[in-house]
Amino acid sequence: MSLHAHLDSSQRTNERRGSRRRKLWLEAEGAGSAKGADVVIHDLSEEGMLLECSVSLNVGERLEVHIPEAGETLAAIVWTSGKFFGCKFDDPLSSAAVSAALLRSPSPPSETERSTALYVALVELRALAKEIERITDRVDSAINRLNTER
């Protein structure tokens, strides 16, 4: 599964909230190419999505995502690995909106897409394992400090 989208090349400030955001549009049938970078969405769920694009995005960066079936929703970049970016939606999408968007997928996933998805999943799991190890070390250190202070 892959969906195609366009990422606005410039960051915009939303006057009401004051935070900088980029806009991402999922391609709609018959829609022309938007100004900016092409993006491939390798995975879309109610909670978030996996993007691949050539534009550099940073953890914490905000995206304003335009999904034809769901309207506008906000997402944050929660991890990066090269040209792959994991995003979490502020408010989950409905399963109907996700299903409708997935139906836009032009064809079943290729071997390359499956390999890419597996690679990205492994990278994410390794990052999570390192984060768990870091937190475990901090907890152990705190416990040791408490035990020595008694």
Image: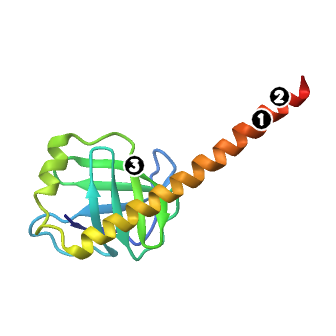
Quadrant in which residue 2 is drawn: bottom left
Q: Residue furthest top?
A: 150
- Residue at 21 percent across and 46 percent down: it is 70
Q: Label 3: state its secondary structure.
A: strand
Residue 131 percent coordinates (x, y): 59, 50
| Rendered image quadrant of residue 84 | bottom left
Residue wearing tag 2:
146
Identify which residue, 57 or 86, lies in the foreground: 86
How busy is the neighbourhood of tag 3: few (under 14 within 10 Å), some, or many (20 plus)?
many
Which residue type does callout 3 highlight?
A: Lys
What is the three-letter code of the residue carrying label 1?
Answer: Ala
Residue projecting furthest to the right: 149
CA gap, disc 2 and disc 1: 6 Å
Q: Residues within 10 Å of mark 1 (few under 14, many from 20)?
A: few
Q: Amino acid at mark 2?
A: Leu
Q: Residue at x 16, y 55 (%)?
A: 101
Q: Secondary structure at mark 2?
A: helix
- Residue 126: image x %, image y %? 50, 59
Question: Residue 10, image x and y in percent?
Answer: 43, 70
* Circle 3 or circle 2, nearest the eye: 2
Is the Cβ of the residue at disc 3 closer than 8 Å to that at disc 2? Answer: no
Residue 12 visible to an observer of this rendering? no
Label 1 belongs to which residue?
A: 142
Q: Is residue 105 visible?
A: yes
Q: Dot 3 corresponds to which residue? A: 88
Which element is circle 1 on? Answer: helix
Q: Quadrant of the C terminus?
A: top right
Instruction: Identify the residue at image location x=17%, y=74%.
Output: 32
| 101 lies left or right of 25 | left
The residue positioned 70% from the left and 45% from the top of the image is 137
